């Protein structure tokens, strides 16, 4: 993971904690809902005043978040008995695409040695990972959900990202798009999920494939994923749908 080592040297532990707590205020500046009217106008990132605050603090926020994020440190997992089956809200972005899983192909390309198109059968032949984790939305709600699917790490092993690859783009069938740092994408708890709570993933929750991870806020966890692209650089005007509207890019937990 890349971070500014000189920044780390300049701050004491107390200062880091002070800035980290200030950075946490950024959680209120975004929303994983597509309905921006549901965000308080005081904290709405489209509001000019809060936009100015974000412009001031986001470079520092991102450096600190990357500093304290450990790419291999597992987040908390829960027992099956903790699942909250009705707590996961459905936030639609544009439309709800219906994708035929029998003809679906996941495109995996970009800065890789072996670009591929993977059918659901191909994906389901990879190791099945199950985890019960908390999905956190910055609107203020959370849900404990069981996700089952394939690690992005295992897909990366197939396509072999090139040495310069630092980011991963995700494109969705509803025109939503997101980008992650590669360390987060290859975290052992970052999945492309195709099951939820022991059943096939419902269409409204992103079937046939969606991102699921306890290390990112809800708006980073794209549904209806149709393309995964490794890249050396981020396109600044296309870092993520809500990120491009002013939300935090890293959005780590």
Image (cartoon, rainbow, N blue to C red):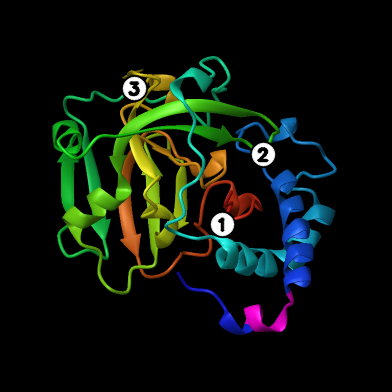
The image shows residue 187, relative to residue 89, as above or below, that is: below
Residue drawn at point x = 31 percent, y = 48 percent = 152
Q: Is residue 95 visible?
A: no
Q: CA distance from mark 3 to mark 2?
A: 27 Å
Residue drawn at point x = 24 percent, y = 41 percent = 106
Q: Is residue 11 magenta?
A: yes
Q: For the residues labelled 3 and 2, say whether their Cβ atoms are less than 8 Å apart.
A: no
Report the mark closest to the observer, 3 or 2.
Answer: 2
Span colored in magenta: 7-12
Q: CA distance from mark 2 to mark 1?
A: 13 Å
Residue drawn at point x = 56 percent, y = 57 percent = 250
Secondary structure beneath disc 3? Answer: loop
The image shows residue 200, relative to residue 242, as above or below, that is: above
When asked about the image quadrant of residue 50, the answer is bottom right
Q: Earlier in the sequence, mark 1 or mark 3?
A: 3
**Disc assigned to residue 98:** 3
Residue 42 position, x and y percent, is 85, 43
Q: State which quarter of the image contains the N terminus.
A: bottom left
Decide: few, some or many residues near mark 2? Use Cα within 10 Å; few <14, some 14-19, many ≥20: some
Q: Is residue 70 left or right of residue 137?
A: left
202 or 196, which lies in front? Answer: 196
Q: CA distance from mark 1 to mark 3?
A: 29 Å
Q: Earlier in the sequence, mark 3 or mark 2?
A: 3
């Amino acid at each position: 993971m890349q971070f500014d080592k000189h920044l780390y040297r300049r701050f004491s532990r107390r200062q880091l904690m002070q800035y980290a707590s200030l950075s946490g205020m950024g959680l209120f500046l975004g929303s994983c809902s597509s309905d921006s009217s549901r965000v308080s106008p005081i904290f709405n990132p489209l509001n000019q005043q809060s936009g100015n605050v974000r412009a001031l603090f986001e470079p520092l926020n991102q450096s600190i978040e990357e500093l304290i994020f450990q790419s291999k440190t597992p987040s908390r997992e829960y027992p099956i008995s903790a699942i909250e089956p009705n707590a996961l809200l459905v936030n639609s972005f544009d439309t709800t695409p219906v994708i035929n899983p029998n003809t679906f192909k996941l495109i995996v390309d970009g800065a890789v040695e072996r670009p591929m198109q993977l059918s659901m059968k191909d994906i389901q032949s990879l190791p099945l990972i199950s985890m019960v984790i908390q999905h956190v939305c910055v609107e203020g709600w959370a849900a404990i959900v069981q996700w089952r699917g394939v690690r992005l790490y295992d897909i990366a092993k197939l396509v072999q990202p090139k040495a310069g690859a630092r980011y991963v783009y995700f494109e969705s069938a509803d025109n939503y798009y997101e980008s992650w740092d590669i360390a987060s994408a290859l975290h052992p708890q970052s999945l492309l999920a195709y099951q939820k709570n022991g059943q096939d993933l419902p269409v409204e929750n992103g079937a046939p494939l969606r991102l699921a991870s306890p290390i990112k806020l809800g708006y980073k966890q794209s549904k209806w994923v149709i393309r995964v692209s490794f890249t050396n650089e981020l396109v600044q005007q296309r870092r993520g749908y809500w990120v491009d509207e002013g939300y935090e890019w890293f959005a780590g937990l």
